[in-house]
Amino acid sequence: MKKFIAIAGNIGVGKSTLVTMLCKQFEWEAFYEPVGDNPYLADFYADMDAWSFHSQIFFLSRRLRSHYQLSQHPTSVVQDRSVYEDAEIFAQNLYRQGHITERDYKTYRELYETVIQTLPSPDLVIYLRASVYTLMTRITQRGRDYEQGITPEYLQGLNDLYEDWISNFVLCPVLAVPADELDYVAHSGHLDLIISKIREKLNGKDEVVFESEEVARAAGD
């Protein structure tokens, strides 16, 4: 049976890398987060208070359309970042920072919640959980110029929102991956362990966790 998998997690946690690795392993099709096609971005960065709402509506509309298309895709797919994160993490963060007014945020949430109820859910959300230290280290290592201004405080705020969201998420099964302990780039055994846990979740096992002993053993590849 075809599967629809979404990979969620903070900036720098390694979503795109895991998408690539899983698609190679399972022979699934990868769909990566589009970059740079938002016509509001230049205005947004120039005046966040004026343009945050417009920018987030654009991102949401694109992500909702992509989510629906992937749910109807004839083969198994893995998505880099879910539609849920647009609303639950990034739009909410802009609202908390005061860049989106309460009136606009209520309109945004009403639209999001109404449409989400009509969309098929993924078969699995893989949530990559990492500390701010790990995120900052990986952001520095990959060296993207536009990410170098990201602060630990900003990442911690997003992490808090991620934890609030994932602890209340019930639309589909979730596999939480401890990305501080699992380096699936450096250790093939860590990737194998993640793959085995994914199979367990897709086969219907409810409680799937990464025990510290098996994580340690997996690093001995």
Image (cartoon, rainbow, N blue to C red):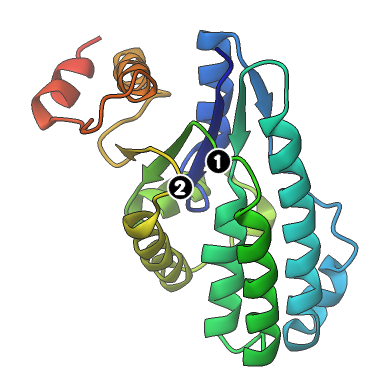
Q: Is residue 147 above or below residue 99?
A: above
Disc 2 vs disc 1: Cβ atoms closer than 8 Å? Answer: yes
Q: Is residue 1 above or below residue 119?
A: above
Q: Residue furthest front?
A: 118
Q: Is residue 65 above or below residue 102?
A: above
**20 lies left or right of 145:** left
* Quadrant (top left, top right, bottom left, bottom right) of the N terminus: top right
Coordinates of residue 177 in the picture (x, y in percent): 32, 37
Q: Residues within 10 Å of mark 1 (few under 14, many from 20)?
A: some
* Along the viewing direction, whichever of 59 and 18 lies nearer the viewer: 59
The label on residue 121 is: 1
Q: Is residue 105 above or below residue 118?
A: below
Coordinates of residue 118 in the picture (x, y in percent): 65, 51
User: Residue, x 80% and y 87% (percent of image)?
Assistant: 50
The amino acid at mark 1 is: Ser
The answer to whether any part of residue 23 appears in the image is yes
**76 lies left or right of 60:** left
The amino acid at mark 2 is: Leu
* Along the viewing direction, whichever of 208 and 155 lies nearer the viewer: 208
The secondary element bearing badge 2 is classed as: loop
Q: Sequence-wise, which precedes: disc 2 or disc 1?
A: 1
* Along the viewing direction, whichever of 181 and 186 lies nearer the viewer: 181
- Work out how far the residue at label 2 is from the one at label 1, CA to CA, in angstroms: 6 Å
Q: Where is mark 2, residue-wise?
A: 171
Q: Quadrant of residue 126?
A: top left
User: Residue, x 14% and y 21% (percent of image)?
Assistant: 214
Coordinates of residue 191 in the picture (x, y in percent): 37, 19
Coordinates of residue 33 in the picture (x, y in percent): 69, 42
